[in-house]
Image (cartoon, helix red, strand yellow):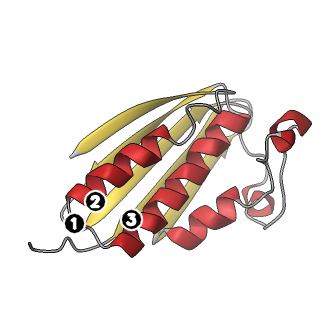
Amino acid sequence: MQFRFELEGGNFSKAGYASSQIKKVLKQLSVDPRVIKRVVVALYEAEVNVVAHAWRGTVQADIDADKIGLLLQDEGPGIPDIDQAMQEGYSTASPAVREMGFGAGMGLPNMKKNVDELTIESKVGKGTTVRMLTYFAMKNN
């Protein structure tokens, strides 16, 4: 199964839509609730990062019998130093984003903690690509 969602920079009212839709699908597929929680946390954090930092982006979710692959691509300022950005508490969020309760610098670390594989590629001035992979087994009902 494949799903695709559009993300709009600055539109926090729609942040979380993709993760809530993927949550519904994984529940229907009887995926372990602990795995669903991990996937949803990681995807939500990734969505918020795109909305907070980029002009626009997309989410592509590929669900197989034993794994879910998530691909997020954005057009934005990019990440100059990915290693630094992976540190808990490090954030480049604007004051306005912080006032809304986002930008605590936990997005990338939470993504890493909740998926089995995470790769981030970024070009300053162009954008960022995030790939996340989580393995699971669907329950046989």
The residue positioned 48% from the left and 53% from the top of the image is 131
N-term-proximal mark, 3 vs 1 = 1
Residue nearest the viewer, comparing 50 with 30 = 30
Q: How far apart are marks 3 and 2 (CA)?
A: 7 Å
Identity of the residue furthest to the left in this view: 141
Q: Which amino acid does label 3 sit on?
A: Ile
Structural crowding at the residue carrying mark 2, measured as other residues with C-alpha within 10 Å and reported as few (<14), some (14–19) or many (≥20): few
Q: Which amino acid does label 2 sit on?
A: Lys
Kindly identify which residue carries mark 1: 30
Q: What residue type is labelled 1?
A: Ser
Callout 1 touching callout 2 (CB < 8 Å): yes
Where 48 sits versus 141, above or below? above
Kindly identify which residue carries mark 3: 36
Structural crowding at the residue carrying mark 3, measured as other residues with C-alpha within 10 Å and reported as few (<14), some (14–19) or many (≥20): many
Q: Distance between the residues labelled 3 and 1?
A: 9 Å
Structural crowding at the residue carrying mark 1, measured as other residues with C-alpha within 10 Å and reported as few (<14), some (14–19) or many (≥20): some
Q: Quadrant of residue 66?
A: bottom left
Kindly identify which residue carries mark 2: 27
Horizontal and vertical percent for residue 50?
A: 63, 38
